[in-house]
């Protein structure tokens, strides 16, 4: 009986509290209150959104906001048992100068402003303004960041934003990779089933990385995020943070990254931008 209840709960997409107050769990998605799920999309005008999101007739949308991050030392050193199956397991220690970072992943709404200005190439979008942009290459992401007055974040900037000076295992702390904190396992569990793309940016505020000047959302899960190639001009770069398609918590850890050709386009890869302080 107990096993049957657990299976039924999984089929319903995970714990009902996985979405922010003001949002409702519909299948694998978090939609605005009053919306409905149509072919995997949050459809209709919401009556309410999560506290960190903006209510629009087209849906709940993350605002364009930056969070200053104070300088500090990045220290990451996963133990052998934690490193099982992770591509990059080397201990890292590096000083990271002060910078600012987008509080949210770049959304379809933000990207459209760059396309409209003729500074970015058009991409096939899903039609929800609050979804993070996916299917984008490193060069295309860097072009948007230049348009926004910034650049793709360096590898150490993304890691330090997630881990903080205390070297957190996850952006929110050292334990608790649960569905109310992070959009992962949406395709085949444990947090949802049959998802074909990411969640609204900022729909899981309980998993935000807390810094003195503000919160950074979705540094784990939702979409894996491009870092700038290191060294510049390299044909390989890393994505950080894991994504909605990952089913294991190991992919969400602050030191985890996946090395890919810079020309890669994937439905689980997006980005955010970094800026001079």
Image (cartoon, grey):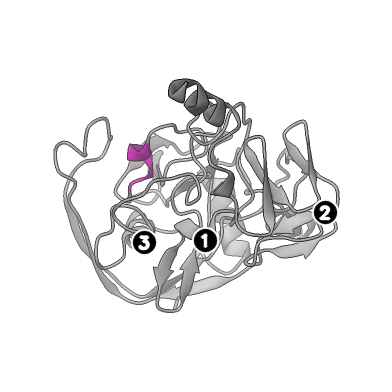
In this picture, residue 179 sits left or right of residue 90:
right
- The residue lying at 73 percent from left, 38 percent from top is 124
What's the CA distance linking mark 3 and mark 1? 10 Å
On screen, 17 above or below 163? above
- Front residue of 32/4: it is 4
Q: Is residue 128 left or right of residue 63?
A: right
- Measured as percent of width and height from the top left, residue 271 is found at 53, 51
Q: Which residue is mark 3?
A: 157
Magenta-colored segment: predominant secondary structure? helix
> Which label lies toward us, 2 or 3?
2
The 10 Å Cα crowd at callout 2, few under 14, some 14 to 19, many 20 or more, is some
Q: Quadrant of residue 116?
A: bottom right
Whichever of labels 3 and 1 marks the residue nearer the N terminus, that label is 3
| Res 232 label | none
Q: CA distance from mark 2 to mark 3?
A: 33 Å
The percent position of residue 268, horizontal first and vertical second, equals: 54, 37
Q: Please name the residue that numbered disc 1 is placed on.
A: 273
Q: Please give left or right for residue 257 compared with residue 57 in the image.
A: left
Check the image and report above or below for 247 versus 218.
above
10 Å crowding of disc 1: few (<14), some (14-19), many (20+): many
Q: CA distance from mark 2 to mark 1?
A: 24 Å
For the residues bearing labels 2 and 3, Cβ distance under 8 angstroms: no
**Is residue 187 in sight in this rendering?**
no
Q: Nearer the viewer, mark 2 or mark 1?
A: 2
- Please tell me whether mark 1 sits on a helix, a strand or a loop: loop
Residue occupied by mark 2: 58
Q: Name the secondary structure under disc 3.
A: helix
């Amino acid at each position: 009986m107990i096993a049957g209840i657990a299976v039924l709960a999984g089929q319903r997409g995970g714990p009902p509290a996985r979405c922010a107050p003001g949002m409702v769990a519909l299948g694998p998605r978090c939609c605005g209150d009053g919306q409905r799920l149509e072919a995997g999309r949050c459809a209709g005008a919401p009556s309410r959104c999560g506290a960190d999101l903006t209510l629009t007739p087209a849906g709940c949308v993350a605002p364009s906001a930056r969070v200053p991050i104070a300088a500090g030392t990045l220290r990451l050193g996963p133990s052998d048992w934690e490193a099982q199956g992770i591509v990059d397991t080397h201990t890292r220690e590096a000083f990271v100068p002060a910078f600012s970072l987008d509080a949210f992943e770049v959304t379809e709404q933000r990207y459209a402003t760059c396309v409209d200005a003729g500074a970015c190439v058009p991409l096939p979008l899903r039609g929800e303004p609050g979804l993070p942009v996916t299917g984008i290459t490193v060069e295309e992401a860097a072009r948007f960041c230049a348009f926004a007055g910034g650049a793709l974040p360096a590898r150490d900037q993304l890691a330090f934003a997630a881990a903080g000076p205390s070297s957190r295992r996850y952006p929110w702390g050292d334990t608790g990779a649960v569905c109310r904190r992070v959009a992962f396992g949406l395709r085949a569990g444990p947090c949802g089933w049959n998802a074909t793309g990411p969640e609204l940016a900022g729909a899981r505020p309980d998993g935000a990385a807390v810094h003195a000047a503000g919160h950074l959302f979705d540094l784990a899960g939702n979409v894996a995020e491009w870092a700038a190639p290191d060294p510049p001009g390299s044909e390989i770069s890393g994505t950080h943070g894991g994504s909605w398609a990952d089913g294991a918590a190991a992919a969400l850890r602050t030191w985890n990254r996946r090395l890919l050709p810079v020309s890669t386009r994937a439905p689980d890869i997006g980005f955010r931008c970094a800026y001079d302080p």
